[in-house]
Amino acid sequence: MGEEAPILEAERVSLRFGGVRALTDVSFSVRRGEIFSIIGPNGAGKTSMVNCISGRYRPTEGRIRFEGRDITRLRTNRRAAIGIGRTFQNLALFGHMTVLDNIMVGRHHLLRHGFLTGMLYWFGGAQREEIAHRREVEEIIDFLEIQHVRKAVAGTLPYGLRKRVELARAVALRPKLILLDEPMAGMNLEEKEDMARYILDLNEEWGMTVLMIEHDMGVVMDISHRVMVLDFGKKIAEGAPEAVLADEHVKRAYLGEADEVVSEAPEATEPVAP
Amino acid sequence: MLAPAGDYRTSYREDMTIFPTRNSRIALWLGIALLCLAPLALGRYELGLLINIGFLGIAALGLNILVGFTGQISIGHAAFFGFGAFASAWLHEVAHIPVALCIPLAGLMTAAVGLVFGAPAARLKGLYLAIATLAAQFILEDFFARAQWFTGGVAGRITEPFTLFGWVADREQSYFYVVLAWTIIMFVAAANLMRTRDGRALVAVRDHYLSAEMMGINLAYYRTLSFGIASFYAGIGGALYAHYLLFVSVEAFNILFSIQFLGMVIIGGLGSVMGSLMGAAFMVLLPEVVQVAADALSGSAIDRALRLGASISFLREMAIGAAIILFLIFEPDGLARRWRLIRAYWKLYPYSH
């Protein structure tokens, strides 16, 4: 990775809900082509950060730039077209649609035929367009190994498969930057390994920059190029996985105040709990 | 989906058809052929029922696109239906446009009105939207009563029969074909819509609007668009109604009629194209069944106790109300799902396990 301009830059982003400070002065940048993870304890503001990037929330202060363009106030539905895709922490599939239709929705911003030519279908090219995109969607289906459920209604699928369908839908957007909010939450070891492989492939073969929130430290350390740690809405560390893991602040955030007191002052008779 | 053994699709085109199997396509063409022959075999009254099913089905389909597919609510659909009826009659009388053209133009006019009243849908949801559409119902009803130039006021408006190149469809036998053609066109168009970009976007807005937005779908646009499409369908249905009855009067398009449309959509199946037609057929045929039952019971003890003959009109309304309640409890997905289950049963018979 050279010193080219970062694909995503957050500049002193703050987010407040009334008196609650979800994010405070968070700055970071994601380089093109890397896998960048955000970690932190529950309620640290990880999802809030991703929501600011994807447009669900508007930062109270600060700016977010994507490929050099200020997207802080860009409407959510315009972000797909500039190349930002995401999955959600709690599954957000279109429950009553088939898997195929779910993924085809991901092609929305790439399709040109509206309701008029859509209704005419055979006349005016809508059918041709659908077939062309179906072909590409099938490639994504092959890649994520969900061929057997392509006609199934998404809401009826087991959890692990739904997670994969949601990833497929985000991939169908053909994003340059894909935001994954806890892609492995609630998965067993085998499913996690599969998901890690998909993420690596997306990054290496499909050329997508990945920004990921994940709690599973093993996975994060294994596949991330760089890691950022949030705690109480503030950035406390950023860097290569090993370096971040060795950081004192991170240890404190993850292991808790009490442990630190024990380790730093072993001769104290009573650990002072906050 | 159940596909018969040995049915292997070899192209995406084959996999994207509306009717998935050869048998279903044969049944479709047979059904259309039979309907084309219907005027030879059926009397005026029966044809009248079929015509009713046709134009009500078209309007119900519009409401289903709004309620079933996009997940919004409208309790003013009958007002749009009425607007289409008056618009078509008005266009013919004032601008002397041939009736055959008045029908689609009335649809477009109604769509424009629907877009205006649908605009709040971009911001309102659920109960609030319901109240906003209720306002549309009352505003339009009031407009019908006052806008003498448009509706003929309380006296109503006489309409002309459908003509096309000298062919006059002034009887059930001939008008039936007009309604049949429109019904097929409108249903095919809706089925096509639902398997292309904007149709999927509507369903996406219904199922999960947050992720729909993330997929690049403009929520306000599609919520409003769905009102426009629904009103277009209502307008076409209303125009067909106007040139069937040859007289349009203000009182017909009240809120009860709007509720009936909702009933059709619920009974037929929310989010099902064919269900809309089934729901309309159910609503049209149920009173007939009640009538037949009352006739069969005439003179019996039940008849004497309940005075069926005198209260038949109440019984019809009550039967519709009871049907809606029973469907909500026992078959909330409507006739469309029941139909799928029956088909699946016969496909697997006798090895259904």
Image: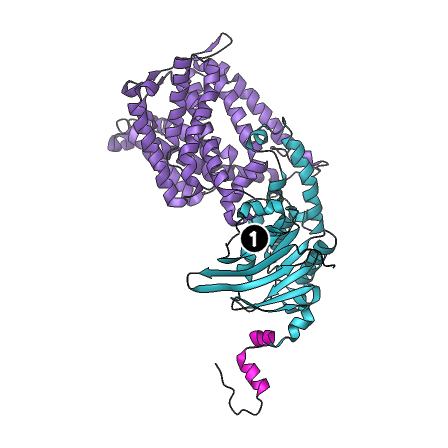
Chain colours: A cyan, B purple
Placement of A214 over or under A165, stated as above or below = below
Q: Magenta span covers which residues?
A: A249-268
Residue at left offset 55%, top offset 45%: A77
| Residue situated in front as seen by the camera: B344 or B125 | B125
In the image, residue B170 sits, relative to residue B116, either above or below, namely above
Q: If the image is split into quadrants, where does the N terminus of chain B sit?
A: top right
Q: Nearer the viewer, residue A122 or A240?
A: A240
Q: Position of residue B289 (x, y in %)?
A: 39, 29
The relative height of residue A27 versus residue B90 in the rendered view (above or below) is below
**Where is residue A58 shown, x and y percent of the image?**
50, 54
Residue A218 forms part of the magenta stretch: no
- x then y, percent, for residue B145: 29, 24
- For label 1, the SS is helix
Q: Nearer the viewer, residue A229 or B9?
A: A229
- Asked if A219 appears above or below A262 in the picture, the reply is above
What's under tag 1, amino acid-wise? Ser
Quadrant location of residue A135? top right
Taking the spot 68% from the left edge, 68% from the top edge, the residue there is A240
Side (left or right) of A196 relative to B283: right
In the displayed orientation, state which residue is furthest to the top: B166
Mark 1: few/some/many CA within 10 Å (<14, 14-19, 20+): many
**Quarter holding residue A183:** bottom right
The number of discs equals 1
**Magenta stretch mostly in which secondary structure?**
helix
Q: In this orientation, does residue A269 appear?
A: yes
Q: Is A258 covered by the magenta stretch?
A: yes
Task: Specify whether residue B285 is in view.
Answer: no
The image quarter containing residue B12 is: top right
State the residue position of label 1. Answer: A54
Give me the chain letter of mark 1: A
Identify the residue shown where x is 55% and y is 56%.
Answer: A63
